[in-house]
């Protein structure tokens, strides 16, 4: 019974997130953020950082070199800087 309740709550949460994501996408499209190259650079940096992090999670700790840590850290900082610039420019 508890599993069914948790599953229903999770599905309701996902439906709510999808609805809010559509609202946010419509808001951004109306304000012109989706045409902003900085938005696409930030999205690409975020996904690249996520990809490197998932790759690192699949490696053994001994196989993760310092260069990979440096790359992920640099991408993370660059992503934060780009999103801050977007926030300052468009107020998202």
Image (cartoon, rainbow, N blue to C red):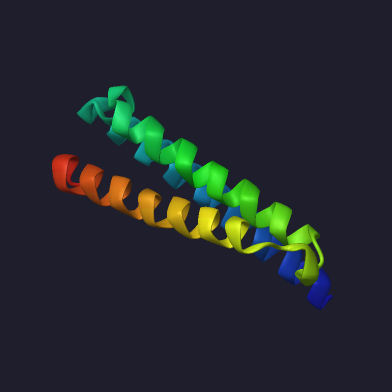
Which residue is most to the bottom?
A: 2
Which residue is most to the top?
A: 35
Task: Indicate whether 38 appears above or below 48.
Answer: above
Task: Indicate whether 72 appears above or below 46.
Answer: below
Please give the name of the residue rendered at 31% of the width and 26% of the height, measured from the top-left corner: 37
Image spot of residue 81 (x, y percent): 29, 51
Task: Indicate whether 21 appears above or below 71.
Answer: above
Task: Indicate whether 35 appears above or below 41.
Answer: above
Image spot of residue 50 (x, y percent): 59, 50
In depth, the one of 56 and 62 nearer the eye is 62
In which quadrant of the rendered view does residue 80 lie? bottom left
Q: How many marks?
A: 0
Q: From this viewpoint, is residue 50 visible?
A: yes
- Report the side of 31 relative to 1 (left or right): left
- Report the side of 49 relative to 8 (left or right): left
Please give the name of the residue rendered at 21% of the width and 30% of the height, measured from the top-left corner: 31
Image spot of residue 88 (x, y percent): 16, 48
In depth, the one of 40 and 30 nearer the eye is 40
Q: From this viewpoint, is residue 92 visible?
A: no
In which quadrant of the rendered view does residue 7 lie? bottom right
Q: Quadrant of the N terminus?
A: bottom right
In depth, the one of 56 and 26 nearer the eye is 56
- Report the side of 42 relative to 12 (left or right): left
Please give the name of the residue rendered at 30% of the width and 45% of the height, measured from the top-left corner: 82
Please give the name of the residue rendered at 46% of the width and 50% of the height, measured from the top-left corner: 75
């Amino acid at each position: 019974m508890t599993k069914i309740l948790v599953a229903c709550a999770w599905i309701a949460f996902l439906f709510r997130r999808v609805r809010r994501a559509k609202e946010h996408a419509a808001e951004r499209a109306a304000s012109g953020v989706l045409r902003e190259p900085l938005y696409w650079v930030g999205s690409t940096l975020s996904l690249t950082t996520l990809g490197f992090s998932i790759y690192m999670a699949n490696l053994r700790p001994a196989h993760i070199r310092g260069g990979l840590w440096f790359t992920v850290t640099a991408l993370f900082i660059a992503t934060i800087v780009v999103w801050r610039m977007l926030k300052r420019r468009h107020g998202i």
